[in-house]
Image: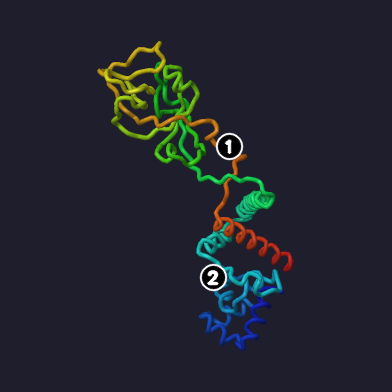
Amino acid sequence: MTFGERLIELRKAKGYTRESFAEFLGISKYTLRNYELSVNDPGSSFLKQISNIFNVSIDYLMGLTDEPEVLKNFRLRTLEQDMIVKYRSLDAYGQDTVSYILDREVSRVQQISNAYKDGRSIIEYPTYFMTYYHNLASAGNGEYIFEDLPTDTIEVPANELSERADFIIGVNGDSMEPTYYDGEKVYVEKMQVLEIGDIGIFMINNECFIKEVGEDGLISHNPKYDIISGNENIECIGKVLGKVTEEQVLNNSSATTVLSREDMEAIRFTKELIESKSNLEKKRG
């Protein structure tokens, strides 16, 4: 049964004529006629309105089920309406892309659901995406900062360090060993003034260093490096908060991110709308 046929059935069951029901809805009888004869497809707001008036599910209205109260309490939310409008504004390529992503996400959520059912442990964690500067801080002879250097975005768990940090940089050199080794990543919080004993990122004559603040200058933890005199033209970029361990850097291809109930419902609803549209097109074809 098409939406138009279902609408006629519901309207007549309530004793409405087409003209009286159109007046009740606040639309012209010609607009209602086009819905009932399937000349025009219903929009999300109209579906919601009819669903509320007759207290039936969207699936029932679209002819996907003969049980009017299967999803009795399901209602379109603003987010879902926006998703429908955006989806319908896409061309065929865009809609195929949305379908691909939805299929992948629905599959992933189903895997998580199955894992719960099987009693397997699923670790839930909030995450941050942070800017990562490759080998930006020199722990040796220095390196230029922020100019023509490769950057990336990496995903890390939300914790005390990542919540405070403004970006992540890589250590380049051995002058801060054994505290920080070449190739390691560190969290950095932007600030211009540090206390003695703090480790920071410093600019000296357009070169970048990671060093500890000492009483007489900047100190390397590797004893083979000399102290950098406080008389130098030193600019503090930020404070090093700590190390980013390899375990903390999430592999986006394999990490499990558990969606909220609302996110899962939105994905499910959008998937159902796409399937509904596909089924309607097949029936018409």
Q: Residue at x 41, y 37 (%)?
A: 165
Q: Is residue 141 above or below residue 154?
A: above
Q: Position of residue 48 (x, y in %)?
A: 56, 71
Q: Rate crowding at label 2 as few (under 14), some (14 to 19) or many (20 or more) other CA atoms within 10 Å.
A: some
Q: Position of residue 57 (x, y in %)?
A: 62, 72
Residue position for label 1: 251
Question: Mark 2 falls on what kind of element?
Answer: helix
Q: Nearer the viewer, residue 222 or 65?
A: 222
Q: Position of residue 179 (x, y in %)?
A: 44, 22
208 displayed left or right of 70: left
Type of the residue with mark 1: Asn
Residue position for label 2: 45
Q: Which quadrant holds the N terminus?
A: bottom right
Which numbered disc, 2 or 1, marks the residue that appears first in the sequence? 2
Question: Mark 1 falls on what kind of element?
Answer: loop
Q: Is residue 247 above or below residue 272?
A: above
Q: Is residue 194 above or below residue 129?
A: above
Q: Is residue 165 above or below residue 11?
A: above
Camera-side mark, 2 or 1: 1
Q: Is residue 263 visible?
A: yes
Quadrant of the rendered image containing residue 230? top left
